[in-house]
Amino acid sequence: MNNKIKIERAVNNITQDQLAQLVSVTRQTINAIELKKFVPSTVLALKICKVFNKPVEEVFFLEDEDFPTQIN
């Protein structure tokens, strides 16, 4: 899963630390999500989207490798 958190933070002039405080996690958690090292829970993803006032599909999105290989 990929995300546009870094872009949304830039548009909204919010640091990783500020976002982390707004959604009650650490700055390291936000960093790990941005780097695709950690997939947030549904609740955390929704909290992040609420901060940016965006639907989840505009902040988080699946990539081809997120889908299993089709079986023929």
Image (spheres, rainbow, N blue to C red):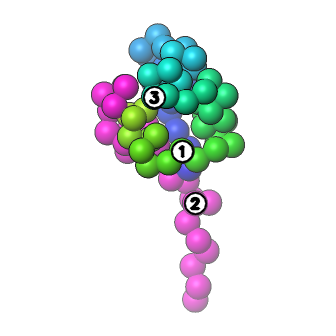
How crowded is the residue under tag 2: few (<14 C-alpha within 10 Å), some, or many (20+)?
Answer: few
Observer-side mark, 2 or 1, equals: 1
Q: Measured from the top left, where is residue 64 in percent x and y?
A: 57, 59
Observer-side mark, 3 or 1, equals: 3
The answer to which of 30 and 1 lies nearer the viewer is: 30
Q: Which numbered disc, 2 or 3, marks the residue that appears first in the sequence?
A: 3
Residue at image x 46%, y 40%?
44
Cβ atoms under marks 2 and 3 closer than 8 Å: no
Q: Which numbered disc, 3 or 1, marks the residue that appears first in the sequence?
A: 3
Residue 56 in sight here: yes
Residue 66, labelled with which disc? 2
Q: Is residue 56 magenta?
A: yes
Residue at image x 45%, y 28%?
23
Q: Measured from the top left, where is residue 69 in percent x and y?
A: 61, 74
Residue 40, labelled with which disc? 1
- Badge 3 is on which residue? 23
